[in-house]
Amino acid sequence: MTTNPQRCLDAVDGFMTLGMYQDALEELANLPPEFRSNDVVFALRIEIFQGLKLWEAGRMLAESLAKRSPENPDWWLSWSFSLRREQSVEAARFVLRKAAAIHPDVALIAYNLACYASVRGEIAEAMELLKRAFALDGKFREMAVEDPDLDPVADSIRAGL
């Protein structure tokens, strides 16, 4: 019996929505082999690994994807997200600085670099990176007010940065 790929992906999405990441991972294994190696499935797998706090697995997959397809900023962001939790803010920051050189107009990269600078106490750098993120995409201003990584610069954000 052949598994319907769309039904399988819908089930994965449902499990993830419910926070049932182990079930989502098991459902991904039901995909026919010819559907397992595409960017949608890779992105789902990374999200599942992150939901399960399998930081090394998430980092390894995202790192390999970023090296294979550096033009996709999502792989870099996923790589740094997992790397921060697996190793350190500094390791994640190193990766995102490379990503920023390739993707200077991706607001989320600038925003995450601002978070990393903030938690390291590098307030001036955090502020500059936040200004860049806000200029690229204003929605980050609202997020920044609530982000605990940005607590050291929260008053400046509220004051209008």
Image (cartoon, rainbow, N blue to C red):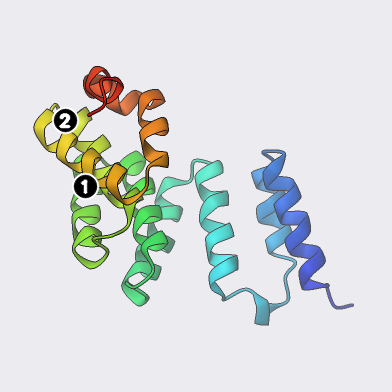
Q: Which mark is residue 93?
A: 1
How busy is the neighbourhood of tag 1: few (under 14 within 10 Å), some, or many (20 plus)?
many
Asked if 123 appears above or below 74 in the picture, the reply is above
Residue at screen point 17% across, 34% down: 127
Q: Which residue is mark 2?
A: 120
Residue at screen point 67% across, 38% down: 19
x and y, in percent, of residue 130 in the image: 24, 39
Residue at screen point 66% across, 82% down: 34
Q: Secondary structure at mark 1?
A: helix
The residue type indicated by label 2 comes to: Arg
Q: Secondary structure at mark 2?
A: loop
- On screen, residue 102 versus residue 60, left or right, reads left
Occupied quadrant, residue 12: bottom right
In the picture, the quarter occupied by the N terminus is bottom right
Q: How many marks?
A: 2
Tag 2 or tag 1, which sits nearer the N-term? 1
Occupied quadrant, residue 25: bottom right
x and y, in percent, of residue 147 in the image: 38, 27
Q: Are marks 1 and 2 in contact (CB under 8 Å)?
A: yes
The residue type indicated by label 1 comes to: Arg
Occupied quadrant, residue 66: bottom left
x and y, in percent, of residue 45 in the image: 56, 58
Q: 18 and 110: which one is in front?
A: 110
Residue at screen point 28% across, 60% down: 105
x and y, in percent, of residue 16 in the image: 67, 46
- On screen, residue 49 versus residue 5, left or right, reads left
